[in-house]
Amino acid sequence: MPRLMALDVSEKRIGIALTDESGAIVTPHSTLVRQPGRRRDMAALRSLIAEYNVSEIVVGLPIRMGGEHGAQAAKIEAFVRDLRGSVRIPIELEDERLTTAEAKEMLAVLSSPRRRDETKLDAFAAALILESYLGRRSAGIAAGPSGADGETESEKG
């Protein structure tokens, strides 16, 4: 079974997590430092997709605690539109509320204060996004903020 990839996208970095070949075990992979424009980011992601035989991408969508989409969500939706134009595999959006805070807690537990590597935070957040998506999917819960067809609400317009 091909792998799934999750992305935790921010202004400066993209956290990346992958499943194993069975699609069951999620591992934080790496953090990509964003480049000006999006061409280099897309090329780096395409390279990883090919290298790991990725069949689907899950992107964290920063929804506000009240459930509304703010400015950050709009930026992620624009990123996803560009990504859809750059790759030919399904892309889903997953609610990422609180994943960064949870990733910080996880990293604090797993690392000693002297060895803590904050650059891993984004990859850990991506892993939490992917675990959430897989858990929801295996429980048969309907698609997240992107809807069953993978379109964001703004694309359905």
Image (spheres, rainbow, N blue to C red):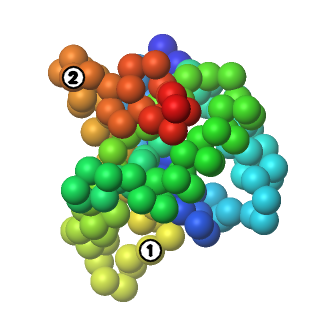
Q: Is residue 133 above or below residue 126?
A: above
Element at label 1: loop
Q: Is 37 displayed left or right of 58 in the figure?
A: right
Residue farthest to the left? 139
The structure residue drawn at horizontal position 42% and vertical position 65%, both measured from the top left corner, is 121
The structure residue drawn at horizontal position 24% and vertical position 29%, both measured from the top left corner, is 136
As drawn, the label of residue 141 is 2
The structure residue drawn at horizontal position 24% and vertical position 30%, both measured from the top left corner, is 135
**Front in this rendered view, residue 78 or 126:** 78
Q: Is 133 displayed left or right of 92 in the figure?
A: left
Element at label 2: loop
Image coords of residue 74 (percent x, y) = 52, 53
Q: Is 84 displayed left or right of 9 in the figure?
A: right
Image coords of residue 5 (percent x, y) = 51, 36
Q: Is 68 displayed left or right of 79 in the figure?
A: left
Answer few, some or many: residues within 10 Å of disc 2's Cα (few below 14, many 20 plus, some between 14 and 19).
Answer: few
As drawn, the label of residue 117 is 1
